[in-house]
Image: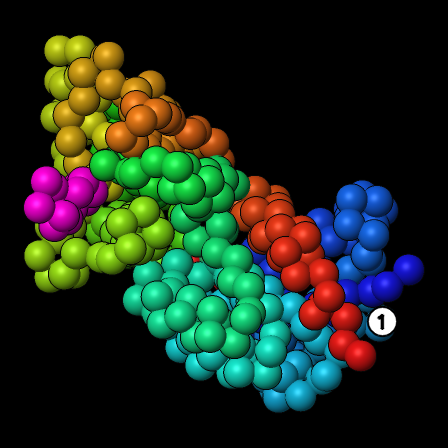
């Protein structure tokens, strides 16, 4: 059975999820694609920490151990921040390695350049996990675009913010307590700044914008407001009046082709599709010229939803690129 050799960059929540799923779904992947997938290397910052990996997997803190291994034809990238992720993935493309990333901060800014570079080198890029975790929004929009035109996208793209707003409404707790609840339950990062400031949702919206509209609005012109200033009394009062606060990322294409985007809390009425989305779920409404409106709802983060979105990208790449995945 031919074997595809892959590496994982970053072995935190997401990297570990990919590793586990590739192991647990080994037989299924074999059956579906005719290939086995072996994770032969894992890159981390600190190689002294104990990692739960098989003896055959190389653990390294040196990217060259991956980039210079001619057997490796796919990289899963799950580290944080723009750099060194962008540099590593650019180098991987240059070496002819297909890339799959979960790194939204990096991809919002550098995704268009990576995609262009990859197209030039005939390399595949998977980025389903960057946006709305396990909700297959990238593939859905990609499919829609073949015969339709996206007019508007609205979404709850940050599960932590949605959890906090839900907790404030249902438990009557202040923002700070709701944030601590989210952290205790493992939904919020130790540093939740990007989540509660709207930056995380903004990055995801820019990734969707590039895909759906082929461009992004000027970043400085997009109003980005977080949820950290919202008072529990406001949330409860709104709820009693039949409204709900939701943190919504919204982008639309105007008649002249320009884009208008904003990210922030809004009050929604009960008939709005995002009204009932509680807890850590994400939801995205895509409005198109021919289809009308389509809403996708699901888990926006976590080890298994995000890891499985990355493995789904791999299966897609295998189907697209079968011949170049096994070196001669
Ligand atoms: N968590 C989620 O549910 C989720 C969902 C969607 C997308 N994402 C995105 O996926 C990425 C990973 O998230 P995560 O939650 O898995 O993060 P995490 O738990 O903090 O893990 C990050 C991993 O990256 C490694 N790392 C960081 N900087 C590195 C560097 N310069 N060189 C080599 N390794 C480095 C760390 O190494 P050490 O272990 O040695 O520190 C760690 O293993 C992020 O970009 C995040 O935005 C996360």
Residue at the far front: name it: 147
The image quarter containing residue 83 is: bottom left
Residue at 86% across, 63% down: 2
Magenta highlight range:
251-264
Q: Can you say whether 108 is above or below 123 in the image? A: above
Percent x, y for residue 198? 23, 49
**281 in relation to 326, above or below:** above
Q: Residue at x 18, y 40 (%)?
A: 252
The stretch drawn in magenta includes residue 257: yes
Q: Position of residue 200 (x, y in %)?
A: 31, 53
Magenta residue check for 111:
no
| SS type, badge 1 | loop
Q: On screen, 59 above or below 261?
A: below
What residue is shown with label 1? 55
Dot 1 surroundings within 10 Å: few (below 14), some, or many (20 or more)? few
In the rendering, at what x and y percent does residue 28 appear?
80, 43
Count numbered badges in the picture.
1
Q: Of residues 196 and 17, which is closer to you in this image?
A: 17
Q: Residue at x 46, y 75 (%)?
A: 120
Quadrant location of the N terminus?
bottom right
């Amino acid at each position: 059975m031919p074997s595809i050799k892959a590496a994982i960059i970053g072995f935190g929540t997401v990297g570990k999820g990919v590793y586990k799923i590739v192991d647990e779904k080994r037989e299924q992947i074999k059956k579906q694609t005719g290939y086995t997938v072996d994770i032969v290397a894992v890159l981390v910052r600190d190689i002294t920490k104990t990692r739960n990996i098989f003896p055959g997997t190389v653990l390294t803190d040196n990217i060259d151990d991956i980039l210079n291994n001619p057997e490796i034809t796919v990289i899963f990238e799950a580290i944080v921040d723009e750099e060194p992720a962008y540099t590593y993935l650019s180098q991987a493309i240059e070496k002819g390695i297909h890339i799959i990333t979960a790194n939204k901060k990096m991809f919002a800014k550098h995704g268009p350049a990576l995609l262009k570079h990859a197209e030039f080198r005939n390399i595949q890029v998977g980025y389903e996990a960057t946006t709305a975790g396990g909700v297959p929004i990238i593939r859905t929009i990609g499919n829609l675009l073949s015969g339709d035109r996206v007019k508007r996208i609205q979404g709850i793209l940050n599960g932590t913010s949605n959890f906090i707003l839900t907790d404030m409404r249902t438990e009557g707790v202040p923002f700070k307590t709701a944030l601590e609840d989210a952290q205790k339950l493992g939904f919020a990062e130790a540093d939740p700044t990007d989540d509660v400031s709207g930056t995380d949702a903004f990055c995801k919206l820019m990734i969707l914008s590039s895909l759906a509209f082929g461009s992004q609005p000027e970043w400085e012109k997009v109003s980005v407001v977080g949820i950290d200033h919202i008072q529990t009394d406001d949330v409860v009062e709104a709820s009693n009046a039949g409204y709900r606060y939701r943190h919504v990322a919204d982008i639309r294409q105007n008649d002249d082709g320009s884009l208008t985007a904003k990210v922030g809390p809004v009050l929604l009425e009960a008939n709005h599709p995002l009204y009932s989305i509680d807890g850590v779920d994400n939801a995205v409404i895509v409005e198109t010229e021919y289809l009308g409106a389509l809403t996708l709802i699901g888990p926006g983060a976590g080890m298994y939803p995000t890891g499985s979105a990355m493995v789904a990208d791999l299966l897609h790449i295998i189907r697209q690129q079968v011949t170049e995945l096994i070196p001669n």
